[in-house]
Amino acid sequence: VAGLYGERVVESLRSARLTTDLLTFPAGEANKTRQQWLELSDRMFALGCGRDSCVVALGGGVTGDLAGFVAATYMRGVPLIQAPTTLLAMIDASVGGKTGVDTPSGKNLIGAFHPPRAVLADTRLLDTLPDTELRSGLAEAVKHGAILDADYFDWITAHAHAILEREPAHLGQLVSRSVELKARVVAADPLEHGERAILNFGHTVGHALELHAAYGIPHGFAVAAGMLIEAAAGEAAGITAAGTRDRLQETLGRCRVPASAAADPAELLPAMRLDKKARGARARFVLLAQIGRTARTAAGEWTHELPESVVNAALRRVIRDAGVV
Amino acid sequence: VAGLYGERVVESLRSARLTTDLLTFPAGEANKTRQQWLELSDRMFALGCGRDSCVVALGGGVTGDLAGFVAATYMRGVPLIQAPTTLLAMIDASVGGKTGVDTPSGKNLIGAFHPPRAVLADTRLLDTLPDTELRSGLAEAVKHGAILDADYFDWITAHAHAILEREPAHLGQLVSRSVELKARVVAADPLEHGERAILNFGHTVGHALELHAAYGIPHGFAVAAGMLIEAAAGEAAGITAAGTRDRLQETLGRCRVPASAAADPAELLPAMRLDKKARGARARFVLLAQIGRTARTAAGEWTHELPESVVNAALRRVIRDAGVV
């Protein structure tokens, strides 16, 4: 992204008489580490950046999370502006103030809440986005519909082709509606004490899959597999309406989102137990009641514990049926 | 501190049926690093600690800052309880939510605001505190009087002997009054957008001295020298009442706080420019109007810019007069 848009953004800021430096790091989730965070911070110290500096995160989710965590901790926090360049970052990572890095134990396990002062999402930047990345972002939009808005879910299903063709009007509508939905949840529960957890539908399994694949699969594809598996588990547990998993699979198929899930269930459970929603080292899941609405427990909680046997069976079933790799 | 009180605290928590593990790290400011933070976090991951864990920081300011930063960033934040064991930590570091680590560029330059759920300050723990540490803490209490409460300043001056003899009633009064004063400032401005900066009196120079000495001098002694130098500079600039520096020196002397300042002024300026209060890479200082009250700028700001020549002259004068090393 630095090569595509870096100099243009720097020139634009400089022409507004803002002292600006371009700091880059190697692309990819594998670089969203504490070491990279340390190096970027040290480069800011070397430049003499003070508390009156501002970090502009120009890039995808990895950049937003990493640069956001630098901003959150540099001198105990400097202002942050998110300038997302991927669909995933526009509709997900840039909204809601989550920043952080991965560790060998799992994804986003170290971080801070540091809301951006502004998010600038210019959908024209999506013209240069690789197709895989577009589809990865689309999976999160499908999730927004699945947990919050059945009409939106149906709209995506109906217009998947136009979205994949990057029709500007469709992309604009997609980004606006997803941001609207996510922002509503985040505003109600910024620090994830309760309701915000529903944004984690598909993520308990999804994060475990990503860790297992050493972050070698796109985030959205892992979440897609996670949604199918968690829907199957929810149906088996009698919490999710029958047929929900089929509807998800149909929509994800139209969006050309492969549900990647090449893993032995036994290897995924340790990572799920270390998921941030876990309690007493027991994995917890966001479950749908039906498309457009999540289910709460009898005690009113937003996440559910499930017997490991149910999760294992769902994993095996989805992997077998979908033939996903 | 682990050897003195670690097992007792662990047993106490376990007897309350709380699963408890003791994590230790080598003592000293030199270990308040990003590397140590990383290792402590990883040990928590290895123990399977979830977001429902709580970090109890048992120790001095280094422990509170470091364990606090671990708590602030572990899974984007878990609850923190401060159990300070030094006077400095009881009256300063444990109050106000600042957490963080040092970097080669300076002290506390990486961190986060993460207020503790509770602070447990048991002054009986001060029985085992080395004398140097007691006096280092006392310097911060003198600072509280100097910036906020002339009566308290006079009380410390009058009772310095009893405090140094660790009379329980005097220690209790000292801790309560200092916490009261600091908490009032912090409550009015938790994120240090304005007023909270006054707690940094003596610290622009003090932090630079500590960095120059590679953290080989007690924090309070560096702050004491910083207060004298910043008072001298304030007097020279016509902002601080004449005689303020002498009164500070008198009180610090009674408290047996040496004002350590062995440094070439030229070597201190780069660190001051990277101080968190700096703007546009220019050092800023908290200045007293007189003992008990800080001075604001004509524009109402809590920190002042001073000509480097004034700061240099103050540094040279204090070092010469006090014969400090």
Image (tube, coloured by chain):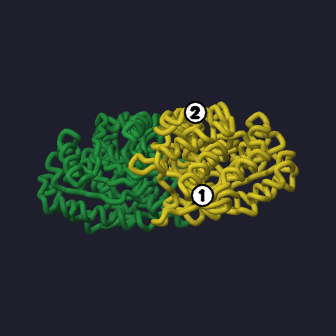
Chain colours: A yellow, B green
Residue under the point 25% across and 64% down: B176
The three-letter code of the residue at mark 1 reads: Thr
Residue under the point 73% across and 53% down: A120
- Residue B15 location, x and y as percent? 20, 52
Q: Which one is earlier in the sequence, the residue at label 2 or at label 1?
A: 1
> How busy is the neighbourhood of tag 1: few (under 14 within 10 Å), some, or many (20 plus)?
many
In the rendered structure, find residue A303 and report the number of the disc placed on it: none
Q: Is residue B107 left or right of residue B301?
A: left
- Residue B202 location, x and y as percent? 38, 51
The residue pinned by badge 1 equals A240
In the rendered structure, find residue A263 and report the number of the disc placed on it: 2
- Determine the secondary structure under disc 1: loop
Q: Nearer the viewer, mark 2 or mark 1?
A: 1
Residue A286 vs residue A16, the one in the foreground: A286
The three-letter code of the residue at mark 2 reads: Ala
Residue under the point 60% across and 55% down: A199
Evaluate whether residue A141 shows in this view. no
Rounded to the nearest angstrom, the CA distance separating label 2 from label 1 is 24 Å
* Quarter of the figure that contains the C terminus of chain A: top right
Evaluate whether residue A198 shows in this view. yes
- Residue A187 location, x and y as percent? 60, 64
Residue A21 vs residue A105, the one in the foreground: A105
Q: Are marks 2 and 1 in contact (CB under 8 Å)?
A: no
Residue B208 vs B304, above or below: the answer is above
- Determine the secondary structure under disc 2: loop
